[in-house]
Structure formats: structure tokens, C-alpha cells
Amino acid sequence: MKRANKPRIASLLILHLGILIYSVSAVFMKTASGFPPFSPRFFLFYGLSLLALFLYALVWQQTLRRFPLGSAYINRSASAVWSLLFGLLFFSETITIKHLAGILVILAGMFMVVRDDE
């Protein structure tokens, strides 16, 4: 690996950390929906979701300094991968062959865009 690629890899890792945070906010929102509205647990998980979205917004703004908007936005589709994984882990949702095929298409598209940007 070339030395010049290290800052780009670090920037991609930061971008995907932000995307992970964005996906976690959906987990908090879905968890909040399982509690009665205006209950303490509802507010706790809803508040955690808002906090996660705030952190994501900070990371996203920093990402846009390092990447063109199109490149950053195509990487945001990785949230579908995280959502599928979180659905399986936290909500016992099933993963079908169609889900896996969709994820492969998303990852292939992301790879082509990122590779084309280099």
C-alpha cells in the first residue's frame, strides 16, 4: 500500500464510522417505538437516537471536507448493510437471499465509485 493512500483510508474509516452511528440511531428509534409514548424509556431511546444523529451530522460535515458529495453519499448506502445486521442481532429479523443479493449490489457499487475516485 502506498503511503499517500493512508490519509484516504483514514478518511474512509471516519466516514464509515459516521455511517455506523447513523445506523445505530435507527436501532434506538425502533427500540423507542416499543415503549408507550411519553414514557421514560421512550424518551431515553428517542434522546439517544437524536444524540446519534447529532454525532453523525458532525462526522458527515467533516467528511464533506475530504470527499466530493457524490462519493460521500454513495458510501452512505453502507447503512443498509448495518441496518440488516442490526435487525438480525437486536430484533431477530431474518435475512433472505434477496437481502444478501441486494447488499452485494450495494457493496459492488460502492467499491466501483470509491475505486473510480482514486
Image: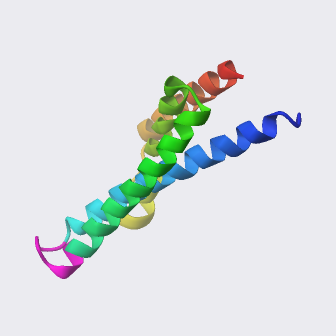
31 lies left or right of 55 = left
69 lies left or right of 51 = right
109 lies left or right of 92 = right
Residue 16, image x and y in percent?
57, 46
Tell me if residue 100 comes above or below residue 93 in the rendering: above
Residue shown at the point (53%, 35%) measured from the top left? 64
Residue 30, image x and y in percent?
27, 61
Q: Is residue 25 covered in magenta? A: no
Residue shown at the point (34%, 68%) measured from the top left? 48
Tell me if residue 18 comes above or below residue 91 in the rendering: above
Residue shown at the point (72%, 22%) measured from the top left? 118
Residue shown at the point (56%, 52%) measured from the top left? 17
- Asked which quadrant contains residue 94, the reply is bottom left
- Asked which quadrant contains residue 49, the reply is bottom left
Residue 67, image x and y in percent?
59, 30
Is residue 84 visible from the viewing direction of this image? no
- Asked which quadrant contains residue 80, the reply is top left
Is residue 20 visible from the viewing direction of this image? yes
Give the extent of the magenta segment: 35-42
